[in-house]
Amino acid sequence: MTAALQQRVRPLLHGGSHSLADVAVGAAAVAVAAQYLAVLFVNAPGYAGLPVSPGLATGVSTAVVAAAAIAVAVTDADPLTGIGLLFVGVFGLLSLLSSAAALPAAAAIVLGTATVAAVAGRRLDLVSAAAVALLVAALSVGLASGVGGWTDLRPVASTVALLGIASTPTFAATDWRSLSTADWGAVIGGLAAFAVVLSVGRAVPFVTGAVTLTGTGVVGTSLPVIALAAAGAVTTASAASRTRRWPLLAGVALVAFAGVPASLPRALPFALGIAALTAQGGTQ
């Protein structure tokens, strides 16, 4: 069904399928970032700004991400990747309509993302493939700890998710065998982010814990792991910005702002971010 849908949609785009997919992923990243900031502002002490409903912001963000996953699914050249992303998008939308769809949606998101990762694994280098496996593991353990009800796994899910985010510079690298091709500006930015998060976390641990819990759903993870994730995200975002690889920037933004994928609203952008990152990894 997905292959037939792709065959009908792609001719209508007249070669603009990649542009449509990039715009969809970019819009999803903006929606997730806006939802992240809205939740932080609403939960900030003494906030007296515009009344923003976190539930409404989350619902809108989830709908945008699900629609983006479907848009990428019907425009992707690989039928298996399209099927995987269609599972992610359709079940993501269904989860908004009924809470009874939570468990099936969680299973579909994991299965769909694993399919995308398996297809991408055939063209990724070993280091990037390992990073993809780590991100998919984070998605699986995260949903098991949240939607699945295995709450004891939540600290493990947080740690694995943050390590997965820390591994995202692998998708920005051009040649692992040559230090001369490294983007040292991005590397320095990542090191600075690590130092800042570590320093702030030690100076004001209560505030740091509140921000990471509210914003990214982190529970039971050490400060160095949080700082490492920040360093990885900043390094990838900096490298993507400096080389104008906007889909890569959108991909890292999706996984970073989604945080720990223990709930469907977090898992959906995390899954789409994995798909965007693997697509960029395959273009090296």
Image: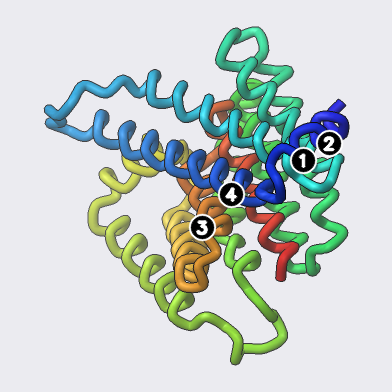
| Position in image of residue 107 (x %, y %) | 75, 26
**Badge number at residue 249:** 3
Does dot 3 land on a helix, a strand or a loop?
A: helix
Q: Which residue is mark 1?
A: 11
**Residue found at x 67% / y 88%:** 178
Question: Separation of disc 4 and disc 1 at Cα?
Answer: 17 Å
Residue type, numbered disc 2 = Gln
| Position in image of residue 49 (x %, y %) | 15, 29
Residue type, numbered disc 3 = Leu
> Crowding near pointer 2: few (<14 within 10 Å), some, many (20+)?
some
**Residue found at x 38% / y 66%:** 193
Does dot 4 land on a helix, a strand or a loop?
A: helix
Residue type, numbered disc 1 = Pro
> Crowding near pointer 4: few (<14 within 10 Å), some, many (20+)?
many
Question: Separation of disc 2 and disc 1 at Cα?
Answer: 7 Å
Whether residue 123 is visible: yes
Q: Earlier in the sequence, mark 4 or mark 3?
A: 4
**Residue found at x 87% / y 26%:** 1
**Badge number at residue 7:** 2
Q: Earlier in the sequence, mark 4 or mark 1?
A: 1
Q: Earlier in the sequence, mark 1 or mark 3?
A: 1
Mark nearer the viewer, 4 or 1:
1
In-front residue for pair 42/134: 42
Does dot 1 land on a helix, a strand or a loop?
A: helix
> In the displayed structure, does residue 208 sit left or right of residue 49?
right
Mark nearer the viewer, 1 or 3:
1
**Residue found at x 48% / y 76%:** 187
Residue type, numbered disc 4 = Asp
Determine contact: label 2, label 1, CB under 8 Å: yes
